[in-house]
Amino acid sequence: MTRPITCAFVLLFICAGATHAAASEDLPPAELHGVYPLDNGLVLAYPLDNLFRGWVECTGRGHHRALDIGGVGPDAGLGSVVRALGRAKVTQIGMPADDPERFGTPLVGVATVVRSSHELPAWKDVAGYGRVNFFTRNYGRHRSGGTISIKLLDGPLVGHEVHYLHVAAARRGLAVGDVVEAGDELGLLGGTAVLDAPPHLHLSIDTPEGRAIDVGPVFGIGVTRVPCRADGKLIAAIRARYTKAARILMSALRRDRARNVVAPEVVSSCGTNVIEGGFEDGKLLSQRFVVAALEDGTLAPFTLQLERVQGLRWAPRIQIEDLRGNALFTGTLAQPGARKRFAFKSLASGKRGSASVVVTPKQLEAVAVKVTAWPVHKRALRGANWRLTIERACR
């Protein structure tokens, strides 16, 4: 697989490279739990290094029409980021603290818990969230723990609803009705309504008609379906197959990220800066640049213009995020809460030519600019090149 170059322009728009470790557990959190785009235009909800149970066809209490994704990293992944599969509208948020009867009573007053013979912290103070309790004292009526649901608005699964269960907390400020972008932070991994197994994310996907589908093929690891009356040997063989496929996938995704970097490049932080690139092999992936305040600390506005330079007809799109990956501007509109931090003036969406927006910071905060495309058939991006112009007055 070939993926576009990814650069980070910080302060002097310095393009910095990433590092890659052979073992996923040795990677820093930003790399281990980063954004992993797939070739189908979706983004992994969570790294697939530690898969548990897949789809089970039994009816009644035995069914499990989902994929359990085990936590990775320190403390079995507690407090690590869970992300949106694609551009979507938030349809449900339910947390134990808000409704203990449905989602489980929060486990408080203890420092640690034991799950599968491992002692884990019962809570942590997490930046941007405050104190997060990772477990509940009981299952709750829904047996789901903390739940976030989103309905995909475009891409290969448009109209499908994605359900995230057992999460510890929803991102602060996230509300039903919000539109999130692919890879946006939704919340934190936990073990709510999980009283024996290790912390994990229970992920399920329903079609627009309400029929659950196997998540494995969506992520490119093959089916995870296990027949209801399968014996232990068959169950182990199926799990070994999709677990191996997942590890191969994660290795390839991290290898591509490590390979697709360039040597540091310095560009003036004011004046006119032009950056050019392309969508290699027609892959609908974004390239990300970080724009910070001027060196003297002034809050100077800057104009972004994205142009289609070469290729079949495709529509350029500018997206703007904060450095945690949360959407601020999605091509035409500012997200709720973003206007307290920045002013956005959309000059052109890009759907009928170039895309252009003026960004005025209201505080000293860097933003990440994503060069991407409005939903388009993958073939339209073959050989497609773009030009991003950043203009900011020097003072």
Image (cartoon, rainbow, N blue to C red):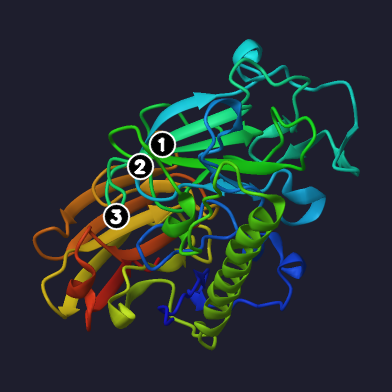
> Left of 263 or right of it: where is 351?
left
Q: State if disc 3 and disc 1 touch (CB < 8 Å).
A: no
- According to the picture, the residue beneath numbered tag 2 turns out to be 88
> Left of 155 or right of it: where is 236?
right
Going by the numbered disc 2, the residue's amino acid type is Ala
- According to the picture, the residue beneath numbered tag 3 turns out to be 156
Query: CA gap, disc 2 to disc 3?
Result: 12 Å
Of all residues shown, which one is farthest toward the bottom? 263
Identify the secondary structure beneath mark 2: strand
Query: Which residue occupies 77% across, 43% down?
Result: 198
Q: State if disc 1 and disc 2 touch (CB < 8 Å).
A: yes
The quadrant in which the C terminus is found is: bottom left
The image shows residue 55 at horizontal and vertical percentages of: 54, 45
Going by the numbered disc 3, the residue's amino acid type is Pro
Mark 1 and mark 3 lie on one chain; the one further toward the N terminus is 1
Mark 2 and mark 1 lie on one chain; the one further toward the N terminus is 2
Query: CA gap, disc 1 to disc 3?
Result: 15 Å
Query: How many marks do you count on the picture?
Result: 3
Q: Which mark is residue 150?
A: 1
